[in-house]
Amino acid sequence: MTEGLQGSVTIEVDGAWDIQDLLALAESMSESYGLFYPLVATEEETRNRLQDLLRKQFWSGDIETRHFGRYIYRSIPREESLRIKSFHYSSPGSIELMGYLGALLLLSRVARSWIAAGTDFLAFWEKIEKFFDKRKRLRRPPRRVELDDDFVVDADEARRLVFDVGAALGFDPISCEKLIEIIGNPISALKFVVAAGNEGRKLATLQENGLLTLPEPGSGTIALQGSGDPRGRTGMVAVARKRRRSPAKKRTD
């Protein structure tokens, strides 16, 4: 791992934990880490490979994508996966986790943003559900789509939602734009922020139940790493432009 990219976060723990709570924490941390690691990884080959998986999944996958982050997590180089540096529990206690610092800070920011937004997120989720209910073909679209006026309107609406929900999750406008670039298009990026928000919600619930306290991620920008040569993005949606028929010429004879 490049010097300076490895770091640790300390999660304060308290309250009456049981084995299911520990399982929920482990699953949510690995799911979130798997989703965020490809956004910040600096090793080009690994980053491009994992981002390509994100693009394929969040274009063709349903809005309610589950367990995909853990699939990505298993593809992260072992030396850059999450590791427990220390674990002390006597109510209160703490867990210190080591890993890719950018991914750790992103998952903490998203979870704490969910807590700060509170019921406002329910309104966002309703808007997203309405978006896909009106456009059922976009829940699991084909690999190749036709670029017509409807698709352009849909993409513009999805972009607005990405910026609205992304801001609520702690992404600044530049990061939202970068996220759309990384995931491939606004519709796929919208599905990604839904998945990220759902995982943040799980960690937020553990904090709201008094079982843990996530660290403050700070207010600084977390740099998202873009892909390399766009021609190598096999996960990008293929677009076929719709040809307009030329008007029939009037006969003059």
Image (cartoon, helix red, strand yellow):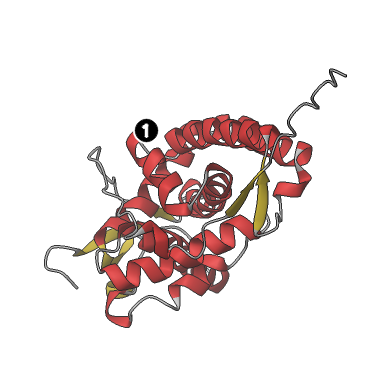
Query: On the rendered structure, is 80 left or right of 149?
Result: left
* Residue placed most toward the observer, 190 or 138: 138
List x then y, in percent, for residue 169: 44, 40
Name the spot of residue 73 as percent of width and height, x first.
Answer: 44, 72
Residue at image point 48% right, 48% down: 204
Query: Visible in this render: residue 78?
Result: yes
Rendered residue at 45%/68% (across/down):
30
- Examine the image and state in which quarter residue 84 appears: bottom left
Describe residue 91's horizontal placement relative to residue 239 as left or right.
Answer: left
**Residue visible at 37% across and 44% down in the picture:** 178
Which quadrant of the rendered structure holds the C terminus? top right
Q: Classify 163 as above or below 97.
A: above
- Residue 176: quarter of image: top left
Crowd band around label 1 with a 10 angstrom C-alpha radius: few (<14), some (14–19), many (20+): some
Percent from the top left, x then y, of residue 145? 67, 51
Query: 12 or 220, which lies in front?
Result: 220
Q: Quadrant of the N terminus?
A: bottom left
Q: Which residue is mark 1?
A: 173
Q: Residue 211 vs residue 2: left or right?
A: right
For the question of whether residue 89 can be seen, the reply is no
Q: Position of residue 208 (x, y in %)?
A: 49, 46
Q: How many marks?
A: 1
Furthest residue toward top: 252
Query: Disc 1 marks which amino acid?
Result: Pro
